[in-house]
Image: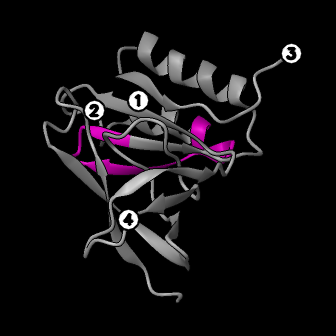
Amino acid sequence: MSELVKIRIELPPENILNASSETLWAKPLGKGLFKLQNSPFGAYGYSFEDVVIADDNEVPTVLGVHENSGHSTYRILLKDGILNTDEFSQAWGELESIGCTYEGSQSKLLAIDVPADTDIFHAYKLLEAGEEAELWEFEEAKCAHNIEA
């Protein structure tokens, strides 16, 4: 049961991927449950290591979140040509230093994972700083951190 499989999340008509669905890698847990192994680029409400419930199609379609991992997901849309610059490296280095990771798509769209034990307020300030420096635009796809003061 430790082999990874592709699962599908249906997307709303208007989405950043301009697609009807998105596939993610997941670890089957049995009984229709799967643990997500990467962050979504277009789907809202899902994060790395969430346990989701899916149907039994050949490529299972996600029906919803069964258990939140506590990770949060953000998306960064990079300005043209910024990915391989010192400015990006410096701004990203600050996010990386607090535990954030990213996956890239089309070298302009990044899915950002903010681990459950990372200070979400600090991460958000760093994302805002990159936006203010005109390195990227960002959006929240899922905030699973406790934001109660």
Give the number of the disc on residue 145. Answer: none
According to the picture, the residue beneath numbered tag 4 turns out to be: 55
Badge 3 marks a residue whose secondary structure is loop
Looking at marks 4 and 3 on the same chain, the residue that comes earlier in the sequence is marked by 4
Looking at marks 1 and 2 on the same chain, the residue that comes earlier in the sequence is marked by 2
Whether residue 120 sits left or right of residue 37 in the image: it is right
Looking at marks 3 and 2 on the same chain, the residue that comes earlier in the sequence is marked by 2
Between 45 and 115, the residue placed more toward the observer is: 45
Give the number of the disc on residue 87. Answer: 1
Residue positioned 28% across, 32% down in the render: 82
- In 3D space, how far apart are the residues under numbered discs 3 and 1 (Cα atoms)? 33 Å
Residue 72 x, y percent position in the rendering: 59, 39
Between 56 and 147, the residue placed more toward the observer is: 56
Above or below for 94 versus 139: below
Check disc 3 and give the amino acid type.
Answer: Ala
Answer whether residue 137 is magenta in the image: no
Mark 1 or mark 4, which is nearer to you?
Answer: 4
What is the image's colouring? one colour
Residue positioned 13% across, 36% down in the render: 18
Looking at marks 3 and 1 on the same chain, the residue that comes earlier in the sequence is marked by 1
Check disc 4 and give the amino acid type.
Answer: Asp
According to the picture, the residue beneath numbered tag 3 turns out to be: 149
